Every structure is written in C-alpha cells, then in structure tokens.
C-alpha cells in the first residue's frame, strides 16, 4: 500500500523546507555549520529519548550501513546549509535534487519510468540559474548544493539498508543522527563558539531540530523502508517545488514564470511515478 509511505515522504518535505526557512534566519548570527550542529544535536537527543535504540540489537554485518547512513546524513546537512547561506532556498533545493534524481535513474527498469525521470530533469534544468542571471549566483553555493545532492543519494541508498538491517527504522535514524552529530559538531563549535548556546538561539534551534531532523527523518525512514529506491527518489522530486513555495511564503523569495513551469513539470513527474507504479515490494536484505 503506497498511501502511508507517500504521505510520510510529503509531510517530511514540508517540515524540512519550513525548517530551512528558520535556519536561514540563524546563519548571520552563528554560521551555517553551527546551525547544522544544533539542529542535529537536539534532534539526536529527541530521537534517542523516543526510540531508545539500545533496546534493538543491530546485526554486526549491518553496522557499516548505519555508519555510512550517519556520515551521509551529517555531510548532506552541512553542505546544504552552506549552500543555503549563499543562494536562494528554491535554487539550493533544485540543485541538491540531482542526488535522488540520479538514484531514481539508476534504479529504473521499465521504459515508462524514464518518461517521469525526463520530466523531472526538464524541471530541474529550468530551475537552474542559466543565462543572464547566472552571474549573480554564488559559485561556491552551487558547489555546496551539488555536494549535498551527492550525499543525499548516499542517504537514500544507505538509509534503506540501515532501516531494514537494524530491525526497526526508528533506532536506525537515532543511531545515524548520533553519528552525523559527532562528525559535524567539531566544525560547528569552531564556527559558532559560545554564541551557539545563547538563550536567544536555543528556542529557535529546538524548533529547527523538530522541523528539520527529528520529525522528517523519522518519516522518511518509514517511507524509504517501504518504497523502492526508484519510487522514493522520484517522489522526492516535489522537494524543489515545496522549497520554492516555502521561500516565497517565509523568505519572500519570489518565483518567475519559468520557475513555476519547472515546478509543475517536477510535480507531474512525482505524481506519475507513484500512480503508475505497481504495488512495490518492501526492501529486503
């Protein structure tokens, strides 16, 4: 049944984009890597308390997948926030989307799947800042966004293995988030220093952890372990559209007609892959 994992993925995307808007307001105060550290740190504490992963045994042969998942998670978050500090939200999400789109393309087996992938690619290309506006786009921000896309691909692939291999998706998310925090924290503390722990910052950091990590990553693990990588990857193509809408509503980043057309193409691709897919099997080892 597709309804539950699809709904979980869509809700996760909405939470993440709302959280990204909150995060962007904190960047001028403590820096993007420090914000990443607070987000992952608070989210890890929440998930450890909720899931208590130590109660679920993890097979020795699957520990490497949880480790890889955590590394991908930490690098994906840090790279995306570094990009978001330099380029608009909708553009950053569109560039980051090259990761899951690549996963979807590599996992495709039916000819009809390529139609939806082609539509999604067309939408992403329209969202890229090519032409007269390209010079205004920060090249370092673009590089960080593309790096985030690469780590997002790893997050999907290793997340499926981690969630299935751990015996329960929740504990896998908690362990992965703990690893991600350990990787990012030294850089975040070096950037933010004592300002990270100011009383004016912590409430926003808690909200950010809920919106951007604790809730969406738990929802995405539910989705990833119930959908094939192909279906999940193309379903996530709605993320640039949701990001652009969040940027408009929360950050006052206006959309052009070309961006609207691109968003429509991407959403059509997402709906198409879900509607035409036949009862996908659950991931197994």
Image (tube, rainbow, N blue to C red):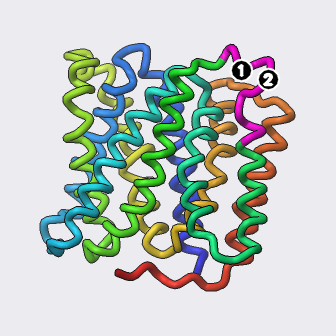
Q: Is residue 135 magenta?
A: yes
Callout 2: 10 Å neighbours few (<14), some, many (20+)?
few
List x then y, in percent, for residue 151: 43, 46
Q: Which residue is mark 1?
A: 134
Mark sitting on residue 131? 2
Which residue occupies the foreground of this view, 281 or 3? Answer: 281
List x then y, in percent, for residue 92: 58, 33
Which segment is the magenta one?
A: 125-136
Q: Are marks 2 and 1 in contact (CB under 8 Å)?
A: yes
Which residue occupies the foreground of this view, 121 or 170? Answer: 121
Q: Residue at x 68, y 71 (%)?
A: 274
CA gap, disc 2 and disc 1: 6 Å
Mark sitting on residue 184? none
List x then y, in percent, for residue 284: 39, 82
| Res. 56 visible in picture | no
- Within the image, what quadrant is residue 1 found in? bottom right
Magenta region, main secondary structure: helix
- Within the image, what quadrant is residue 38 found in? top left
Q: Residue at x 84, y 43 (%)?
A: 261
- The image shows residue 31, relative to residue 117, as above or below, that is above
Left or right of 76 on screen, residue 182:
left
């Amino acid at each position: 049944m597709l309804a539950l994992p699809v709904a979980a993925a869509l809700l996760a995307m909405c939470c993440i984009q709302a959280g990204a808007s909150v995060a962007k307001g904190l960047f001028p105060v403590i820096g993007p890597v420090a914000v990443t550290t607070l987000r992952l740190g608070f989210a890890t504490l929440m998930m450890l308390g909720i899931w208590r992963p130590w109660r679920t045994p993890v097979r020795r042969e699957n520990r490497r997948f949880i480790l890889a998942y955590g590394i991908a998670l930490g690098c994906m978050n840090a790279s995306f926030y570094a990009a978001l500090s330099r380029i608009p939200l909708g553009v950053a999400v569109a560039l980051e989307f090259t990761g899951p789109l690549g996963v979807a393309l590599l996992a495709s087996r039916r000819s009809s799947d390529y139609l939806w992938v082609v539509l999604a690619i067309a939408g992403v290309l329209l969202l890229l800042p090519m032409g007269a506006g390209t010079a205004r786009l920060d090249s370092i921000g673009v590089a960080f966004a593309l790096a985030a896309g690469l780590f997002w691909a790893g997050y999907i692939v290793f997340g499926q293995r981690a969630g299935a291999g751990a015996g329960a998706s929740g504990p896998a998310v908690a362990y992965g988030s703990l690893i991600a925090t350990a990787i990012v924290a030294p850089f975040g503390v070096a950037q933010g220093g004592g300002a990270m722990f100011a009383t004016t910052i912590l409430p926003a950091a808690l909200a950010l952890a809920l919106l951007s990590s604790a809730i969406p990553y738990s929802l995405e693990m539910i989705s990833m372990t119930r959908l094939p990588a192909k279906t999940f990857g193309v379903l996530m193509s709605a993320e640039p559209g949701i990001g652009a809408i969040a940027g408009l509503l929360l950050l006052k980043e206006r959309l052009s007609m070309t961006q609207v057309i691109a968003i429509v193409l991407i959403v059509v691709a997402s709906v198409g892959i879900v509607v035409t897919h036949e009862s996908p099997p659950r991931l197994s080892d």
